[in-house]
DNA sequence: CTAGTTTCGCTACTTCAAGTATCGATACCG
DNA sequence: CGGTATCGATACTTGAAGTAGCGAAACTAG
């Protein structure tokens, strides 16, 4: 998982397999201290590695958080007999992920940083959003801009609740979100 | 506008009426440089005042931005013959406001800061969200949690688009947002 | 006109975090 | 063994939030 699957192993001392440890330390530190106070120094200390080791692997704190989220989310489970079940399970899945300790804070935090950092925005969009967007386009047969709108609504709503209250959205409200979104994205409901 | 309407003027040198100038400088600086690089030093320089003057009036950068947004938004225009028109105009209004130069960046930026700053979250919730929430509760006759959900969806969606793309949401998508939200909040559509 | 109070601009400072630089030591390849 | 890239450790640079203390200015009360 840590080791690249490249053809020949590159020369030099190989990287130790501590990415998973660093990811875990990142989430727990963010969970305990919040995003802003989860400094790279503290994350490194919690993971038992040097700060320089982290900066050798990720170009910035935002990139670390992005990869950490990618690792925490994993692939989108595309389950459901029909279109409605598929979308419903996707919404509940991302809501549950964002509810996990540290994940929501880290997500909202890195998203915030990206607002005034175009480079991080590119990383976030390409590494985190695009894979799920493509999977959804494929599963739903919707054009790109409709799936982007879907993501804006679902993720935006969940993050806004998290940001304004500090708590993840309750199940009842996630269900309301599903019920609001489903008709709009029902087969043949959209324009074109 | 700047001067307090308090009973007797307090002793000492009165504050100069530069709040409006500071607000304008804040928005233009955020618009030019982005939220993170719009430092209080730079905002003060753009407004032609000393940084200490700003910190005499607002306890933190976040509080300044919050008041600046409050000033930029103004009161929620509650127009519309019926419930649907009222909600539609409210969504288009906030979308237009967020599209104004600097406003969306400032909003997304201060929101981001609030994620890991409970004190700022309190300021943001009480000074910015609550007035509009109360006005909506009154106008729509909906309970608090439904209006909060409405705000999460609308503002969250608009900010997510702004944060991920750097551009405000296009009119066509705002219209789609309205069409998605309206049926869910139609009279008698909700639980209880 | 003077005394009291508060704001003003200015400069200097403290604190903290992101990110960089450098070093000797270590692990792996050929 | 020689080459190379990583490791931990320490020190450093840079930039921004927020604070402290100054003399000058503006206003009010007497």
Image (cartoon, coloured by chain):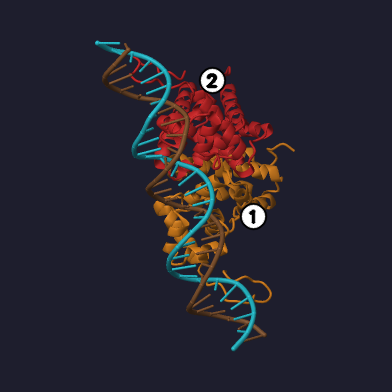
Chain colours: A orange, B red, C brown, D cyan
Q: Position of residue B167 (x, y in %)?
A: 65, 38
Vertical position of residue A77 compared to residue B126: above or below? below
Q: Residue A80: x and y, percent?
A: 60, 53
Tell which of B122 and C27 is nearer to you.
C27
Residue occupied by mark 1: A131
Task: Spot the residue most to the right.
Answer: A192
Where residue B15 appears, as percent x and y from the top left, is: 42, 22
Q: Which of the 4 quarters of the picture holds residue B37?
A: top right
Q: Quadrant of the C terminus of chain B?
A: top left
Query: Visible in this render: residue B144?
Result: no
Crowd band around label 2 with a 10 angstrom C-alpha radius: few (<14), some (14–19), many (20+):
some
Q: Is residue B49 left or right of residue A32?
A: right
Check the image and report above or below for D4 versus A188. Answer: below
- Pick the front one: B2 or A88: B2
Q: CA distance from mark 1 to mark 2?
A: 41 Å
- Residue at the disc numbered 2: B78
SS category of the residue bearing label 2: loop
């Amino acid at each position: 998982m840590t080791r690249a699957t490249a053809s020949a192993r590159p020369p030099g001392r190989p990287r130790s397999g501590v990415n998973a440890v660093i990811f875990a330390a990142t989430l727990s530190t963010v969970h305990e201290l919040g995003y802003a106070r989860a400094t790279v120094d503290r994350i490194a200390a919690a993971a038992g590695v040097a700060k320089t080791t982290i900066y050798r692997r990720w170009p910035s704190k935002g990139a670390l958080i992005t990869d950490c989220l990618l690792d925490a989310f994993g692939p989108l489970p595309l389950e459901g007999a029909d279109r409605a079940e598929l979308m419903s399970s996707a919404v509940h899945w991302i809501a549950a992920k964002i509810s996990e300790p540290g994940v929501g804070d880290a997500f909202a935090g890195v998203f915030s940083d990206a607002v005034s950092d175009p480079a991080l925005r590119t990383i976030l969009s390409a590494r985190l959003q695009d894979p799920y967007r493509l999977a959804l386009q494929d599963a739903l047969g919707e054009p790109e801009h409709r799936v982007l709108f879907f993501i804006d609504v679902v993720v935006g709503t969940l993050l806004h609740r998290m940001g304004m209250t500090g708590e993840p959205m309750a199940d009842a409200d996630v269900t309301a979100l599903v019920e609001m979104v489903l008709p709009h994205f029902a087969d043949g409901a959209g324009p074109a």
